[in-house]
């Protein structure tokens, strides 16, 4: 049975009066060229320096994936190009400030970055295997907006991360008391 138009990218895990819980499927977008990266950077008011182009290009090549700075560093420097960790951090910071990338704080000094495709979503993180899933729940978002309104607060961003064990790890395959340690090791 096929889903209707507009449903193809999403897997609806639950519907009904509890609201929609949407899991984003991992999908690929067409590879974007460096020329496009130049244009995207310029449109965001950033000078298209090589580090910025390379970092932005990397995230366009891996949409819907999450990487720590150290992971990006290793992947980019595997390409024979040399970029210092400091330069990488500055590029990441600027790209997040310009809303081209998003950062997600995973606690205990762990931070991951992802392409900002303009779709708000939250994350579920397995502390044993480090697996990250994305979801969007209309009711949670509506409640967050209501809370912000209640405080007469103008919301500039929102983040929600659920920590725990994924179904596979709960089956005991990779279960370990040292979950948090494994997560930070996976992100380096
Ligand atoms: Zn897991
Ligand atoms: Zn995400």
Image (cartoon, rainbow, N blue to C red):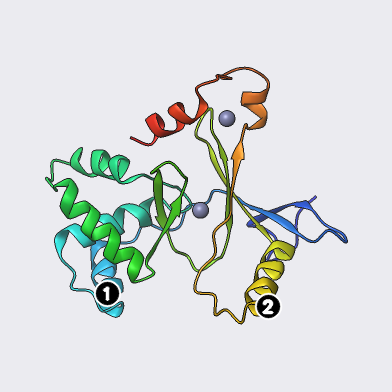
Mark 1 touches mark 2? (CB < 8 Å): no
- Answer yes or no: disc 2 within 8 Å of ligand 2: no
- Residue 120 x %, y %: 56, 64
- Residue 161 x %, y %: 57, 49
Q: Does residue 48 appear left or right of residue 110 in this picture?
A: left
- Kindly identify which residue carries mark 2: 150
- Residue 170 x %, y %: 66, 24
Disc number for residue 52? none
- Residue 101 x %, y %: 38, 62
- Number of residues whose C-alpha sits closer than 10 Å to that of mark 2, classed few (under 14), some (14–19) or many (20 or more): few
The quadrant in which residue 8 appears is: bottom right
Residue 24 higher or lower than 132, as above or below? below
- Number of residues whose C-alpha sits closer than 10 Å to that of mark 1, classed few (under 14), some (14–19) or many (20 or more): some
Residue under the point 88% across and 61% down: 17
Circle 1 or circle 2, nearest the eye: 2
Q: Does residue 8 appear left or right of residue 72 in this picture?
A: right
**In this view of the protein, can residue 54 be seen by the observer?**
no
**In this view of the protein, can residue 141 be seen by the observer?**
yes
Residue under the point 45% across and 27% down: 182
Residue under the point 61% across and 82% down: 152
Residue under the point 52% across and 29% down: 129
Secondary structure at badge 1 equals helix
Q: Nearer the viewer, residue 24 or 8?
A: 24
Give the mark nearer the N terminus: 1 vs 2.
1
The quadrant in which residue 72 appears is: top left
Disc number for residue 39? 1
Q: Ligand 1 appears in which quadrant?
A: top right
């Amino acid at each position: 049975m096929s889903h209707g138009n507009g449903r193809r990218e999403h897997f609806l895990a639950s519907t009904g009066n509890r609201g929609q819980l949407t899991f984003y499927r991992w999908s690929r977008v067409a590879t974007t060229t460096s020329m496009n990266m130049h244009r995207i950077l310029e449109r965001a008011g950033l000078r298209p320096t090589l580090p910025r182009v390379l970092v932005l290009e990397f995230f366009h090549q891996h949409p819907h994936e999450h990487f720590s700075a150290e992971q990006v560093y290793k992947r980019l420097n595997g390409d024979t190009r040399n970029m210092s960790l400091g330069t990488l951090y500055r590029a990441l910071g600027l790209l997040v400030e310009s809303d081209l990338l998003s950062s997600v704080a995973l606690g205990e000094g762990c931070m991951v970055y992802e392409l900002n495709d303009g779709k708000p979503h939250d994350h579920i993180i397995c502390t044993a295997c480090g697996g990250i899933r994305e979801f969007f729940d209309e009711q949670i978002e509506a409640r967050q907006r209501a809370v912000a309104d209640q405080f007469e607060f103008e919301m500039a961003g929102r983040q929600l991360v659920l920590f725990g064990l994924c179904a596979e790890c709960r089956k005991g395959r990779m279960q370990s008391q040292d979950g948090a340690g494994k997560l930070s090791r996976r992100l380096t």
